Image (spheres, rainbow, N blue to C red):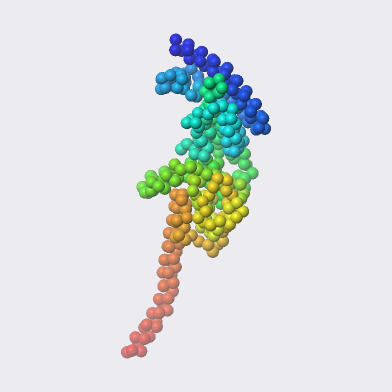
């Protein structure tokens, strides 16, 4: 009997999902958006498994789902607004995995709505790149990005650092860095882990249009070290959105940042107060240590040059006293 009820529910849901899909398609076309939309109703097997966990069909909110794929992140949020203007959203089920990706790098906007006919429908909204990553993993996403930006990759600019990776994969690289440091026995403060792993994320740009994924509250030096440590160590200033800004200016979503460098500029101990990410702190610490070692070696070398000159003078003084 239960199986019969589930089959009836699935049949009705398929027909109702078709109606919702047409409504959404019309609304998106009215906004002149280019998009791809596909839907699914849970299979009988999946529904049975969910039923075992939830206990009632009424507690299963993703029985019907539609996935919408658009070109840009900005369009994802536009689609979310359109859906919420069409249907009543279930506020507790809105998930922004674009601003805050899952630990595995997954990105999408999720929302669950109630239609005027009291149907509950789940939506996933993402870009094509996000979709490639979600469906086929890290390698597929990276390949897709390479195909899309093949001219950039052919340039082979070694100073672009992690920006060669799609923005969501940069975060994965940072997670791998932190994991390696923890495995090596390094003590990373809880506050630092909170910034790197659990805080909100922002997206900022280089003047060339390269996108960088940083934690909210990041400072200009964090951006410089995200590009490349060799660029960061020679930084003497930052131009943000075309305006000169201080090292203390917090970065914001959409900022375009130019790192101003000169060969005679080097890291200073005070920079430790001007970085927030563990990646930047680690690179800065290595650079400051290298500068200290070079200073000590320079002093030793200078002493070695002076000492041979002073020894004959001392010897001649002793001979005169005799």
**Which quadrant of the rendered structure holds the N terminus?**
top left
Q: Quadrant of residue 132?
A: top right
Whether residue 69 is visible to the viewer of this picture, yes or no, is: no
| Residue at position x 47%, y 55% in the image | 274
Can you give x and y, in whole percent of width and height, for residue 134 in the image?
52, 32
- Count of numbered circles on the image: 0
Between residue 187 and residue 112, name the one nearer to us. 112
| Residue at position x 46%, y 19% in the image | 57
- Tell me if 80 is positioned left or right of 300 in this view: right
Whether residue 80 is visible to the viewer of this picture, yes or no, is: yes
| Residue at position x 46%, y 43% in the image | 199
Between residue 310 and residue 29, name the one nearer to us. 29
- Tell me if 117 is positioned left or right of 47 in this view: right
Can you give x and y, in whole percent of width and height, for residue 139 in the image?
53, 36
**Which quadrant of the rendered structure holds the C terminus?**
bottom left
Q: In this view, does 94 lie above or below 287?
A: above
Q: Seen from this angle, which residue lies furthest top?
A: 1
Can you give x and y, in whole percent of width and height, for residue 61 in the image?
48, 24
Q: Quadrant of residue 269?
A: bottom left
Q: In which quarter of the image is residue 295?
A: bottom left
| Residue at position x 53%, y 29% in the image | 89
Q: Seen from this angle, which residue lies furthest left?
A: 322
Can you give x and y, in whole percent of width and height, for residue 123 in the image?
54, 28
Q: In this view, does 299 lie above or below 200?
A: below
């Amino acid at each position: 009997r239960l199986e019969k009820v589930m089959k009836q529910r699935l049949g009705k849901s398929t027909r109702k999902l078709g109606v919702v899909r047409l409504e959404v398609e019309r609304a998106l076309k009215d906004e002149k958006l280019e998009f791809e939309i596909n839907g699914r109703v849970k299979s009988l097997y999946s529904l049975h498994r969910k039923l075992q966990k939830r206990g009632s069909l009424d507690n299963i909110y993703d029985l019907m789902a539609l996935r919408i794929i658009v070109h840009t992140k900005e369009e994802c949020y536009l689609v979310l607004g359109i859906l919420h203007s069409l249907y009543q959203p279930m506020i507790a089920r809105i998930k922004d995995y674009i601003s805050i990706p899952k630990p595995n790098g997954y990105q999408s906007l999720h929302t669950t709505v109630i239609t005027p006919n009291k149907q509950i429908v789940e939506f996933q909204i993402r870009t094509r790149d996000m979709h490639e990553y979600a469906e086929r993993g890290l390698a597929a996403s990276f390949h897709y990005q390479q195909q899309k930006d093949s001219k950039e990759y052919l340039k082979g600019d070694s100073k672009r650092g992690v920006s060669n990776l799609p923005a969501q994969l940069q975060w994965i690289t940072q997670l791998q860095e932190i994991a390696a440091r923890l495995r090596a026995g390094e003590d990373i403060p809880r506050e630092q882990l909170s910034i790197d792993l659990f805080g909100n994320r922002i997206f900022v740009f280089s003047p060339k249009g390269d996108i960088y994924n940083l934690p909210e509250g990041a400072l200009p030096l964090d951006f410089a070290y995200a590009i490349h440590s060799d660029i960061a160590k020679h930084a003497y200033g930052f131009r943000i959105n075309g305006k000169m800004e201080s090292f203390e200016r917090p970065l914001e979503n959409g900022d375009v940042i130019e790192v101003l460098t000169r060969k005679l500029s080097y890291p200073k101990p005070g920079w430790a107060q001007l970085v927030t990410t563990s990646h930047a702190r680690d690179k800065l610490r290595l650079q400051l240590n290298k500068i200290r070692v070079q200073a000590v070696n320079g002093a030793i070398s200078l002493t070695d040059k002076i000492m041979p000159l002073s020894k004959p003078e001392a010897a001649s003084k002793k001979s005169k006293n005799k």
